Amino acid sequence: MKTGYVYIMSNYKRTTFYIGVTNSLERRVLEHKQGSTPGFTQRYKLKYLVYYEVAASMWEAIAREKQLKNWHRDWKINLIKSVNPEMKDLSVELLGQESIDAETGSA
């Protein structure tokens, strides 16, 4: 069975959040960073990976995504801060490269 990932993307100021699910976290994060998929994440410039979980299967990942989407905003922020207190962009470590700041264009 294929591994699944639940992830949370945010904007530069960490005021808007998007919860998603994928079978390839690296590919999906790059898609968000490039803004290649029209919709909510592109419109609100959600290019920063602030949280992710690995699930044993896509079914488990989808169930977890649905659970998190029903949580209150404060619960989601507390979850993120429990593993990423500074809410830094985790894609830097995940992708093994320096993250480009989407707002300023600098590294």
Image: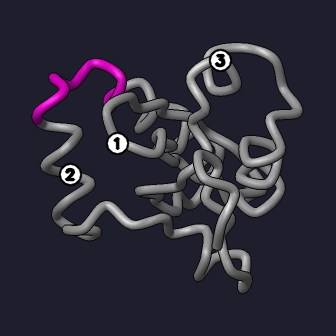
- How many numbered badges does the structure rendering display? 3
Pick the front one: 76 or 34: 34
Q: Residue at x 45, y 33 (%)?
A: 65
Report whether 11 appears left or right of 21.
Answer: left
| Residue 14 included in the magenta stretch of the image | no
Rendered position, 13 above or below 3: above
Q: Amino acid at mark 2?
A: Leu
State the image coordinates of residue 47 (x, y, percent, origin top left): 61, 45
Q: Which residues are magenta?
A: 67-74
* Residue named by callout 3: 43
State the image coordinates of residue 28 (x, y, percent, origin top left): 76, 48
Q: Residue at x 74, y 48 (%)?
A: 33
Please give the label number shown on residue 79: 2
Disc 1: CA contacts within 10 A as few (<14), some (14-19) or many (>=20): some
- Quick check: can you spot residue 19? yes
Rendered position, 12 above or below 18: below
SS label for mark 1: loop
Q: Residue at x 59, y 82 (%)?
A: 93
Task: Choose the circle earlier in sequence order: 1 or 3.
Answer: 1
* Residue named by callout 1: 14
Disc 3: CA contacts within 10 A as few (<14), some (14-19) or many (>=20): few
State the image coordinates of residue 36 (x, y, percent, origin top left): 88, 33
Alpha carbon of mark 3 to alpha carbon of mark 2: how far? Answer: 24 Å
Pick the front one: 65 or 88: 88
SS label for mark 3: helix
Report whether 24 appears left or right of 58.
Answer: right
**Magenta stretch: dominant SS?**
helix
Task: Choose the circle earlier in sequence order: 2 or 1.
Answer: 1
Q: Quadrant of the C terminus?
A: bottom right
SS label for mark 2: helix
Task: Choose the circle earlier in sequence order: 3 or 2.
Answer: 3
